[in-house]
Amino acid sequence: MAISEGIARGRAKIYRHTPIAVEREQIAKSQVEGEHSLLDQAFRRARTALERRKGGHLEGEALEILETHLLLLQDPTYIKSIKEMIEEKLINAAWATEEVTRGIIHTLQASDDEVFRQRAIDIRDIGDSIVVHITGKGAHPSLVLDEPVILLADTLLPSEFFSLDRSNILGLSLDRGGLASHVAILARGLDIPTVIETHPASHAARDGDDVIIDGIRGEVIIRADRQAAQNVIERYNAYLKHEAELLEGASLEARTKDGKHIPIQSNIQTLGELSFAEAEGSDGIGLFRTEFFFMERSTLPSEEEQFRVYKEVLERVAPRSVTIRTLDLGGDKVVSSLNLVEENPVLGFRAVRFCLEHKDIFLTQMRAILRASAFGTAKIMFPMISGVEELKRTLHLLETAKLQLKKEGASFDPDLQVGTMIEVPSAALVTDLLVPHVDFISIGTNDLIQYTIAVDRNNQKIAHLYKPLHPGVLRLLKHIVDQAHRAGKRVAVCGEMASDPCQAVVLVGLGVDELSMGSHAILKLRKIIRLLDLAAAQSLVEHLLTLDSSVKTEQAVQEWMHERFDDLTIR
Ligand code: PEP
Ligand code: MG
């Protein structure tokens, strides 16, 4: 899987991560206190080490990731659980740390959420650093890069990545890792051509081998022959030309050839992503997923903390708008302090269902968003609404928040636009009943597809059944758009469909007014929209609606696209 575009060629350097060995030792009751203070000291030292690193020349995502690690280290429940284990089981601090850390990792890895699964490696990193400071033994074998290399690792912890001289990494291949892993994010931020999930590349290559990392196709070519190398170079040149063209379009309006303006906005979850969105010429933020701010910490953020974050985003994005989505917590997106474990989390106690039962949390967030709305163009929207009753209860709470603020004399935007997400089939079917209560709707196709086809969006075993162009999904989308338009309300899409060129043209053909996506796709979609004839996209959709299977709809769209766009644009 390519995660950072570009191509690099150089000599291979193989790195194998070795887990730290920890031994279990039984201790006497009288030693408990000693182990506790050993632990306190280790936490302090690990923190100091991170602070020192933070004092270096880090910025953007790297800094944010370090701060996340610092927050994890400061999590009082973490150290408390370790201390309790020492006391209850009478075991040494290093082993207790390992046990508790492993427990957290296990929970994270069982999550349906890719981002959570990827946080397991961060917890491993923190756990290791504490064990190292308890035992005084060295950490992982050090990896020194004194010349530019292509690094082929089985896995890399963020701390290992931080300790490397990154200017000597020409390209990176990770046998494991995931799109949402912090090392992947760091590599992308540094523009290092990177391919992940390359198992068994680090075993197939040897130190010094000639290796090409093709971060466009997602290939690692070991000991390439002349022809293979030549092919890659040609692809690279085509890619550079294509990139230059896309960049030229960054400041141009995304308007179809026949004149419909389709704002292309960004989905973000952290402040660190803002500058990237900016650089890609985003037309604002169409989805600010606020739950991540809640998840990477052990206590709930206060109204003031939330207010500051929302305000900063709004100020930086102004005059363009920011659509802030209220908490989509619960189920698979777990906050440690709220302890939510369910049999069937995706159909469970999540998002507004959770918030309406925790009105204090909901109200605090609404107040923070409202207060921040005075500093830019804010919109608010609610996830997982399943029907009118839920929406009304949510809107009632929003009114309560407004009344409270008015009484307190706090200012907020009185015209703040309010929207609902449509991501549950029941909501989709009653769009006409929902829209009178809101200013806009935003379709969360990720969830809408999973619920419509009854296919878990995170389950690899059934990934082949997850079909955005399924005739059932297309009919439902058409129903939503038509009903909203009948009431004169705008329709956005903020699910992944918006970022896929083949699917986005279908959305536009269906009448969708705005698209919001990961910023990496913005330039490409802007180009597509500018080359698109809306009337032709509408005819395509009419044809698609007559087809009886996703095999046929997909094929029809692909053919249609190949007639109109070049290969790189479609990919
Ligand atoms: C969606 O479901 O399409 C969506 C945008 O929300 P999330 O991916 O955060 O569930
Ligand atoms: Mg969703």
Image (tube, helix red, strand yellow):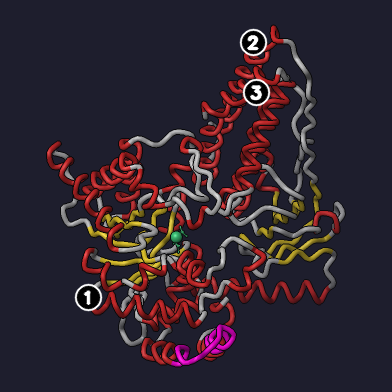
> Residue 64, percent across and down?
50, 42
- The C terminus - image quarter: bottom right
**Mark 2 or 3, nearer chain start:** 2
The residue type indicated by label 2 comes to Glu
Mark positioned earlier in the residue sequence (1 or 3): 3
**At 76% from the left edge and 43% from the top edge, which residue is drawn?**
146
On screen, residue 36 versus residue 483, left or right, reads: right
Question: Nearer the viewer's eye, disc 1 or disc 3?
Answer: 3
Does the CB distance between marks 1 and 3 fall below 8 Å?
Answer: no
| Location of mark 1 (residue) | 487
Residue 348 location (% of width, % of height): 47, 53
- Please tell me whether residue 554 belongs to the stretch shown in magenta: yes
Residue 201, percent from left and from top: 80, 58
Q: Is residue 548 magenta?
A: yes
Q: Is residue 251 visible?
A: no
Q: Nearer the viewer, residue 526 or 355?
A: 355
Give the class, few, some or many, for how many residues have Cα within 10 Å of label 2's Cα (few <14, many ≥20): few
In the image, which disc is placed on residue 33?
A: 2
Secondary structure, mark 3, is helix
What segment carries the magenta color? 543-557
- Residue 21, by quadrant, is top right
How packed mark 3 is, by other alpha carbons closer than 10 Å (few <14, some 14-19, many 20 or more), is some
Circle 2 sits in a helix, a strand or a loop, which is it? helix
Quarter of the image that includes the N terminus: bottom right
Pointer 3 residue? 85
Which amino acid does the dot numbered 1 rest on?
Ala
Tell which circle, 2 or 1, labels the residue nearer the N-terminal end: 2
Q: Main secondary structure of the magenta part?
A: helix
